[in-house]
Image: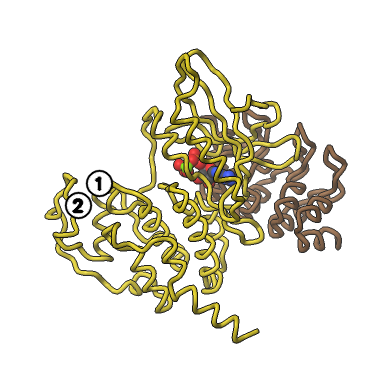
Chain colours: A yellow, B brown
Amino acid sequence: MAHCTSMQYEPVAEIGGGAYGTVYKARDTESGKFVALKNVRVPTDQDGLPVSTVREVALLKRLDQFDHPNVVRLMDVCATKRSDQETKVTLVFEHVDQDLKTYLDKAPAAGLSPDRVKDLMRQLLSGITFLHSNRVMHRDLKPENILVTSGGQVKLADFGLARIYSCHMALTPVVVTLWYRPPEVLLQSSYATPVDIWSTGCIFAEMFRRKPLFRGDSEMDQLGKIFEVIGLPPEEEWPTDVTVSRKNFPPLSARPITDFVPDINEQGAQLLLKMLTFDPLKRISALNALEHPYFQEEEALIQTNS
Amino acid sequence: MPLQEQLTSAAARGEAAGVEELLRAGAQVNGVNRFGRTALQVMMMGSSPVARLLLAHGADPNVADGRTGASPLHDAARAGFLDTVRLLVEAGADPEARDGARSLPVDLAKRNGHAEVAAFLEAL
Ligand SMILES: Nc1ncnc2c1ncn2[C@@H]1O[C@H](COP(=O)(O)OP(=O)(O)O)[C@@H](O)[C@H]1O
Ligand SMILES: [Mg+2]
């Protein structure tokens, strides 16, 4: 790992203080452009950085070489020794000056056009497919972590760090939003890449609604809000490795998704339901979502128009 | 965290509601954070709501970055956000200001492929 050319990057503002470290908006004084600096403190022993950290950083660098259009570039990684016990690892990412939250807030009163939603979703799912095919899950997809350039290009930020963090998290209590969390995470069951599809479904709905679909204020409240829409799942789908009992929830049945997302079209509603599927094993994958008829419709339209 | 720090962070995160609240609570719109930057300098450039709020409260659009000489107009033009560029110009940002590399905002818009922004700045 390179030694930090910390002089090159000058912080200008703190933009995030997660459980694991701090995120800064900074200036790359060589190019004049803004970058996002993520500092992670990792414990060091006499052998230097933990193997797990070195491996995760190597994975991120390898991912970056694909130059995928829908993930932010990792421009630099530096390690600065803080003490005998601790090293600061700084990840330097391309900075994008707009997130999806701002983008949705700025949309005209009538909301985003169906074509715009479809384009954003296609890019979002392309980025996720890329990450998942490299066995990286994002785990914290939300409008603040989805960046949109002035040209309308979607770029995922904050991916692949979950494992670096979870190894070394100095569990300071931070308020994390529950609104995009899938049932398996809320239930503290085991989870994998389908978590990102659930979050993407919530965001898909939000693009039409312009407000979050499930706004719970505790894990139980969040689950309750989810079941009010998708219905209480059958007993046989309830995970067996969890302490929360299905009996805590009223036996609601599913309501039409269009009650909650009235502007979505038929195919979009079908895809959304496949993403908001309780059982992670039955939930659609990112790759299959991209092949869903919802995305083919417009293609047909473009072909007949041109 | 002091109000100034909070204001610049909220601006950088594009949180318009937070910015408004902090200004109401007495945060100085032209005050600097611990890095010596004002809220307008570090705001999320794509957040025209934040730009509008700060400028309406008297944010100075002509503060240059101490290190690179870039003004908020340089940064908004480089990132290609026409709505923010417009707001800055309407509030008196100088389109003829040069950064440390002698570039004009319009140069940065062109170099980064933002034709609409370049056309707007050229027409001034
Ligand atoms: N590459 C980037 N460019 C611009 N903003 C970024 C980038 N990476 C992260 N951010 C912003 O920084 C915020 C704070 O990040 P972080 O501390 O990880 O908090 P969170 O837990 O909210 O994601 C993110 O929500 C995102 O809006
Ligand atoms: Mg994050």
Q: Which residue is depicted at the point 51% across and 74% down?
A: A114
- Closer-to-camera residue (A154/A126): A126
Q: Position of residue A260 (x, y in %)?
A: 35, 70
Residue A263 visible, this angle: no
Q: Position of residue B77 (x, y in %)?
A: 75, 52
Q: Which residue is depicted at the point 67% across and 43% down?
A: B40
- Closer-to-camera residue (B23/A140): A140
Left/right placement of residue B98 relative to residue B28 reads right
Q: Which residue is depicted at the point 37% across and 61% down?
A: A213
Residue on which disc 2 sits: A239
> Could you tell me the amino acid type at mark 2?
Pro
Residue on which disc 1 sits: A189
Q: Any mark on residue A175, and which?
A: none
Sequence-earlier tag: 2 or 1: 1
> Could you tell me the amino acid type at mark 1?
Ser
Tell me the element at label 2: loop
Task: Determine whether label 2 and label 1 are within 8 Å by CB.
Answer: yes
- Closer-to-camera residue (B108/B90): B108
Q: Going by the picture, which residue comes out furthest to the bottom?
A: A304
Q: Going by the picture, which residue comes out furthest to the left?
A: A247
Q: Position of residue A160 (x, y in %)?
A: 47, 43
Q: Which chain does tag 2 point to?
A: A
Q: Which residue is depicted at the point 47% across and 67% down?
A: A290
Q: Which chain does tag 1 point to?
A: A
Left/right placement of residue B11 relative to residue A181 reads right
Dot 1 beta carbon under 8 Å from ligand 1:
no
Distance in Å between CA atoms under marks 2 and 1: 7 Å
If the image is split into quadrants, where does the C terminus of chain A sit?
bottom right
Residue A149 visible, this angle: yes
